[in-house]
Image: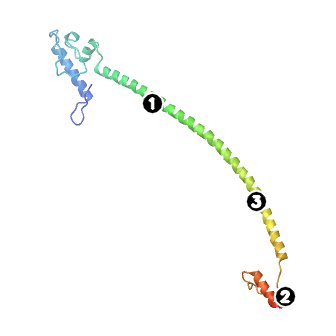
Amino acid sequence: MLAVRSSAGRRTRRENLARSESFVGSLSARYSGGPPDWSPPRSAPRGFGFVAKKYGGAGKSSASTFRMAGMPLPHTRNYKLRQEQKVDGQGWLQNIYKEQSCKVVKSCAEIEGKLSTMEERTMAVEADIEALRVQTATHDGQLNDIMWKLEDQENQQMRNNLRFLGIKEGEEGNNIRAYMIKMLQDAFPELTN
């Protein structure tokens, strides 16, 4: 894997790639006729698979050295890695999309069910309200009849009331019967015996 240089002092990918290509080029020029058992030094950057003398010769570039070794160029290797990561990412996104779309479909089905029951309940409430309107109209008619009967009874009671002349309003107090007996005894003393 390539290191990245940040402001803290690490190398960028481009710097790493240029360094490794120059290193491979210097090795192939240096060991063009070198021993067959040559192996890369321990300090060689990892990930690029540096090749021995049999894969390259003098005057060959690092790109041709990699090609002759049957290995992809570093940027090709990174490209394939990026492509694999893209494919993996696309599969992951498709899985998430499927899961989320299933959740959305389930939610829509639940909402549809709730809306249908809500519609039924609304229709039932509207029917109840209409029944209450009819019942209220019936009660209004009955109340008018009762009010008319009450008024008629009050009129009849007023016609049947006895009126005494000469008695001031409110003089009788709370007990009208006792007041009338006393008044009659005063007016007709002979009736009391």
Quarter of the image where one finds residue 41: top left
Q: Which residue is mark 2?
A: 191
- Give the CA separation, mark 3 to mark 1: 64 Å
| Marks 2/1: CA–CA distance | 112 Å
Residue 71: image location, x then y, percent: 28, 15
Q: Nearer the viewer, residue 123 or 145?
A: 145
User: Regarding mark 2 in the picture, which secondary structure is present there?
Assistant: helix
Is the C-beta separation of discs 3 and 1 under 8 Å?
no
Residue drawn at point x = 43 percent, y = 25 percent: 91
* Residue linked to disc 1: 96
Disc 1, SS: helix
Against 135, residue 115 (above or below) is above
In the rendered structure, which disc, 2 or 3, sits on the residue that comes first in sequence? 3
Nearer to the camera, 178 or 64: 178
Q: Nearer the viewer, residue 8 or 21?
A: 8
Please state which of the two labelled residues, at mark 2 or mark 1, is closer to the viewer.
2
**Label placed on residue 140:** 3
- Residue 82 location (% of width, % of height): 35, 24
Task: Give the residue at the far front of this rendering.
Answer: 193
Tell me the CA gap for discs 2 and 3.
Answer: 54 Å
Identify which residue is drawn at 80% across, 72% down: 154
